[in-house]
Image (cartoon, helix red, strand yellow):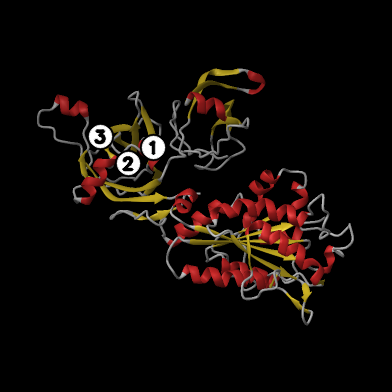
Amino acid sequence: VGRTEVVRSSLHPVFSKVFTVDYYFEEVQRLRFEVYDTHGPSGFSCQEDDFLGGMECTLGQIVAQKKVTRPLLLKFGRNAGKSTITVIAEDISGNNGYVELSFRARKLDDKDLFSKSDPFLELFRVNDDQGLQLVYRTEVVKNNLNPVWEPFKVSLSSLCSCEETRPLKCLVWDYDSRGKHDFIGEFTTTFEEMQKVFREGQAQWDCVNPKYKQKRRSYKNSGAVVLADLKFHRVYSFLDYIMGGCQIHFTVAIDFTASNGDPRNSCSLHYINPYQPNEYLKALVSVGEICQDYDSDKRFSALGFGARIPPKYEVSHDFAINFNPEDDECEGIQGVVEAYQNCLPRVQLYGPTNVAPIISKVARVAAAEERTGEASQYYILLILTDGVVTDMADTREAIVRASRLPMSIIIVGVGNADFTDMQVLDGDDGVLRSPRGEPALRDIVQFVPFRELKNASPAALAKCVLAEVPKQVVEYYSHRGLAPRGLDVPAGEASPGYTP
């Protein structure tokens, strides 16, 4: 899952690294935590690292208890002395943004004899039980009483549990390589106060050492900490866009190449069995029935490719299966099913398997929507095919262009063909590039071999096929800086963002 930062020379380390893990109530999600004494550079694994102990539990246990403390165990279940590990879980599903903060300080106390202090800052959230939860630890700025720390980002949930009035505590230390850091000073604030004083141009706090203040009547502070920058990035969800009126337009493209087999033959992938839908129909109905809930007019474009079509029986790679080129839309999923069944006896299955023309056709419509500058229309193209595309170069080019548009492409491979080459279009393992080397702006293609889900329920099939779409919708509108309609970005806020 991940690795924390290295805390040097400490027997009681508090790690600031936060891990985001998806939680599924219906699954047992086992986790293992291992602690090492590292001898390598910060953040890098070294084979010489010493194993200090591990702990296993389930995510459900942490979620239920919110805070789990367990002994660290060595190999064969032996206790690692009195060592323990504490894991804290928080629900961030309601998180609606993240904060970008930048701090600097001036005239800090000098704690070193032969040089200046090496200051770093720790930001803590004060919990309901008055305990402190580390939110972020800055880097160390060497030999500087007026340090400028690097900006950092933190979710609103991690910062203040989405409660802007929750107390926050900042501590400033002089770094010591042996782990015995010297305390310089502290101050307390809230995120609400941070925003107010930053807007007013007075974002500065005295850095106070309580011991000095108590002992010295003339003591004022040990320096000052300045909030140099504050940006709040609101993060919208897929549901925000849908509830804001964004419509999902669904287009299906069906492979009518000869490799499917004669539709009159029961072995054909296009064979219409009155008692059992073929793979094309299964994929079409399971995905379409979900998409139609997000389309107000319930009309879907239905296209075909790779067939000779009437009246001249010339090969076409983007024909309307209802044979109405002026209006290729069908009434609901049932209308698409009927158009498909009526189309089969009227066309001659041929080839090749070219899908770039259909991708480009849908992209032209999506491009017109992009120019409106609103989060109102998003396009999903479902391509059902029985083999690897033959116009791979043109398809890659078309996908890269489409990656800049409000559009997602789902490719379902039906039948038992070898679809290995199709995985190149799914950018999960790397960035898809056009033949000219231009990278896709975002991953918009999801490829699913139907045979892996052949015996799955329609709901399971749809869940797998549509899994990436909500993220892709949010990524697109976040990249464009478009908020859901009806949700204006308040003055002073940054543009909407997306945290993967």
**Which numbered mark, 2 or 1, is in the foreground of this view?**
1
Q: Is residue 166 visible?
A: yes
Residue 371 falls in which quadrant of the image?
bottom left
Quick check: 104 left or right of 428? left
Q: CA distance from mark 2 to mark 1?
A: 21 Å
The label on residue 220 is none
Specify whether residue 136 is in view: no
* Sequence order check, earlier mark of 1 and 3: 1
Residue type at mark 1 is: Val
The answer to whether residue 428 is left or right of residue 266 is left
- Of marks 2 and 1, which one's residue comes earlier in the chain? 2
Q: Which residue is mark 2?
A: 118
Disc 3 residue type?
Answer: Thr
Disc 3 marks which residue?
Answer: 188
Above or below, 136 against 200 in this view is above
Please indicate whether residue 345 sits to the left or right of residue 284 in the image. right
Name which residue lies at 63% across and 52% down: 289
